[in-house]
Amino acid sequence: MRWPEGAEPERSVVYAHNELVISAPRERVWRWLIRAAQWPEWYGNCGWLRFRNGDGPDLAPGTEFVWKTFGVRVRSRVVVFDPFNEIGWNATAFGLTAYHGWELDALPGGATRVVTEETQRGPLTALGRWYLRRGLLREHQHWLEGLARMAASGDPP
């Protein structure tokens, strides 16, 4: 994972790591992952998502978006974008700063290993670190499972 300076796991209050092998080609998994406009349709922890500056429906380098996750309005910007390999965005909300990254590795036989990691810092994060980490691990697993379902259905529209 290409961590932005200051967002590394060893410098963060909360760190979560999830991974899943998805039975679909990496290119298809990538296309579903970057189609952020559709996250609310298949990822239950994304209440809504709005692009800023006329961006979307896909994430791209520098894309800015505002979304509701964990019941909180969060502002994000894509800061790492390596097509079919890695994507990451920062996230800011009251009392927290975070970084969420994804890595995709093609496996023999056409499957894809997907790793997602998030770090968080800030005063509210420090107060709720135990609760936040458990929630991140649970919801990121749901996100991976939803991504696997969508990739199994074919390419995004």
Image (tube, rainbow, N blue to C red):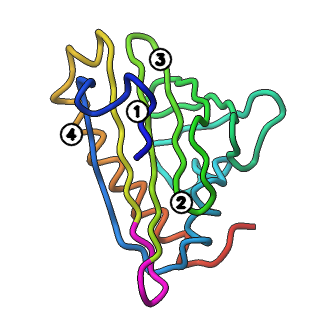
Q: Is there CB contact under 8 Å for labels 2 and 4? A: no
Q: CA distance from mark 3 to mark 4?
A: 19 Å
Q: Amino acid at mark 4?
A: Arg
- Reading the image, the residue beneath label 2 is 85
**Of the residues tagged 2 and 3, which is closer to the observer?**
2
Where's the C terminus, which quadrant?
A: bottom right
Which corner quadrant of the image does residue 22 belong to?
Answer: bottom left
**Of the residues tagged 2 and 4, which is closer to the observer?**
2
Q: CA distance from mark 2 to mark 3?
A: 27 Å
Q: In terms of depth relative to the viewer, which is nearer, 99 or 58? A: 99
- Reading the image, the residue beneath label 3 is 93
Q: Is there CB contact under 8 Å for labels 1 and 2? A: no
- Reading the image, the residue beneath label 4 is 134
Q: Which residues are magenta?
A: 107-113
Q: Is there CB contact under 8 Å for labels 2 and 3? A: no
Q: Is residue 51 above or below residue 42?
A: above
- Reading the image, the residue beneath label 1 is 70
Give me the residue at 44% from left, 42% from top. Answer: 2
Q: Secondary structure at mark 4?
A: helix
Q: Is residue 83 left or right of residue 96?
A: right
Which of marks 1 and 3 precedes in the sequence?
1
Q: Amino acid at mark 2?
A: Asn
Which of marks 4 and 3 precedes in the sequence?
3
Q: Is there CB contact under 8 Å for labels 3 and 4? A: no
Which of marks 2 and 1 precedes in the sequence?
1
Q: In terms of depth relative to the viewer, which is nearer, 73 or 10? A: 10
User: Residue 41 got which mark?
Assistant: none
Q: State the image coordinates of residue 102 (x, y, percent, origin top left).
A: 45, 51
Q: Is residue 45 above or below residue 34?
A: above
Q: CA distance from mark 1 to mark 4?
A: 12 Å
Q: Amino acid at mark 1?
A: Phe
Give me the residue at 38% from left, 11% from top. Answer: 95
